[in-house]
Image: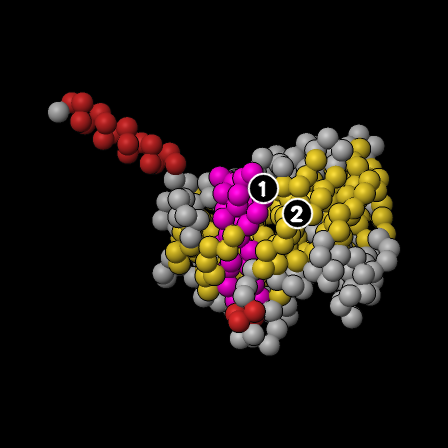
């Protein structure tokens, strides 16, 4: 009896330790929004609390955490000026602004902090550029430097006549920065120097003509890049060589069948995720208002569509996962909703968690503080 009791106590303690309440922040856009919103996510129940306004800021689209997880940065607008704003996160999750700096080249579309915490990058879709902000030891923003992209594939009129950088991110070792450019049909690759800090153009990787690169993710082992093509609703797999920072296209997988795409007047891809176990990939489909689940071949990087799951909302501009890969959250930008899905750890399939939807005005980005 004593042995059984001890086992029960151990299992109870293990379950309790694994469950946690996490801060979730929402970047937003549109006339009805007031700034960055916050909710609490229960990782045991898979539920979100009601939201509250965490910080007033105009159009705070995308958000990024500092590597110390105690600072949050956002692109947004203050007094009609496009800026990066830094916030300290206190123990209750409240945001307190401590630094701000103007981008000076159009509206910021995406933001990422270098793994060293010594600088951050923003992508300017309209300005056709990448901005670099040094960060001091306290995380305060230094003077901006702008790197402009040039050209345009011109495959899709009005969308690819000029550069449109859409995402910024880094290799796991921090030696390279990657910028998918929708207008160029290329991933632009930069060599980083965290100590100066600077970025220097290193090379590029071409995707399919007219694909419109939007966002990308590395495979868990770092051997592949999964690039989301916004305009063709597809994912291109690239073989990545970490020794020289180069990427080579190996395959492209449609997110939706032609029959599915024909059901809506307009469709476009928005976000891509890789599951922590490396075997599953997910992308969101606006118009079709769904998430495509893929299985990934670890040897080739080849993706195979497993299912297409409705988000129970409209216009999923962003999706995200918790670090455990147990839960997926989907933002309906047009329905003002966040929905929750449980991920089957064996198949990768999604199960909608009923009665989990909460309302957030114009959600564009979901950021979980972990």
Q: Which mark is residue 250?
A: 2
Q: Characterize the local packing of mark 1: few (<14), some (14-19) or many (20 or more) Cα atoms within 10 angstroms.
A: some
Which residue has dot 1 on it?
300
Position of residue 191 relative to residue 97, above or below, is above
Q: Characterize the local packing of mark 2: few (<14), some (14-19) or many (20 or more) Cα atoms within 10 angstroms.
A: some
Q: Secondary structure at mark 1?
A: loop
Task: Locate residue 303, reporting x and y percent.
Answer: 55, 50
Q: Secondary structure at mark 2?
A: strand
Q: Which residues are magenta?
A: 274-303
Determine contact: label 2, label 1, CB under 8 Å: yes
Q: Colour scheme in the image?
A: secondary structure
Position of residue 71 relative to residue 123, above or below, is above
Residue placed most toward the observer, 72 or 166: 166
Task: Locate residue 330, reporting x and y percent.
Answer: 50, 58
- Locate the N terminus by quadrant: top left
Q: Residue at x 37, y 34 (%)?
A: 17
| Residue 79 visible in the snapshot | no
Residue furthest to the left in view is 1
Q: Is residue 292 magenta?
A: yes
Q: Residue 232 is drawn in which quadrant?
A: bottom right
Q: Residue 211 is drawn in which quadrant?
A: bottom right
Q: Earlier in the sequence, mark 2 or mark 1?
A: 2
Residue placed most toward the observer, 51 or 147: 147
């Amino acid at each position: 009896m004593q042995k059984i009791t001890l086992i029960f106590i151990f299992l109870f303690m293990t379950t309790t330790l694994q469950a946690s309440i996490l801060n979730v922040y929402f970047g937003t856009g549109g006339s009805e929004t007031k700034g960055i919103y916050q909710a609490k996510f229960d990782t045991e129940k898979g539920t979100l609390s009601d939201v509250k306004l965490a910080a007033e800021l105009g159009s705070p689209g995308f958000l990024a955490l500092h590597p110390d997880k105690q600072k949050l940065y956002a692109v947004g607008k203050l007094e009609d000026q496009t800026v990066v704003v830094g916030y300290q996160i206190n123990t209750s999750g409240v945001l307190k602004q401590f630094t701000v700096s103007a981008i000076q080249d159009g509206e910021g579309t995406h933001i990422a902090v270098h793994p060293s915490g010594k600088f951050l990058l923003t992508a300017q879709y309209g300005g056709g550029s990448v901005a670099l902000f040094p960060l001091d030891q306290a995380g305060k923003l230094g003077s901006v430097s702008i790197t402009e992209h040039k050209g345009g594939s011109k495959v899709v009129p009005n969308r690819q006549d000029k550069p449109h950088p859409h995402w910024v991110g880094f290799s796991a070792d921090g030696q390279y920065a990657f910028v998918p450019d929708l207008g160029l049909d290329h991933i632009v690759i930069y060599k980083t120097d965290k100590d100066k800090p600077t970025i220097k153009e290193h090379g590029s990787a071409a995707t399919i003509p007219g694909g419109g690169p939007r966002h990308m993710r590395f495979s868990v082992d770092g051997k592949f890049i999964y690039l989301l093509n916004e305009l063709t609703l597809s994912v291109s797999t690239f073989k990545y060589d970490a020794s020289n920072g180069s990427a080579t296209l190996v395959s492209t997988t449609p997110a939706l069948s032609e029959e599915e795409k024909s059901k809506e007047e307009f469709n476009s891809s928005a976000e891509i995720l890789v599951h922590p176990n490396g075997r599953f990939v997910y992308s969101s489909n606006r118009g079709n208002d769904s998430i495509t689940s893929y299985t990934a071949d670890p040897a080739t990087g080849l993706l195979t569509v497993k299912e297409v799951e409705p988000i129970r909302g409209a216009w999923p501009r962003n999706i995200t996962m918790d670090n455990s890969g147990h839960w997926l959250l989907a933002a309906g930008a047009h329905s003002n909703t966040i929905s929750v899905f449980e991920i089957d750890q064996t198949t990768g399939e999604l199960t909608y968690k009923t009665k989990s939807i909460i309302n957030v005005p114009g959600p564009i980005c979901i950021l979980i503080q972990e």
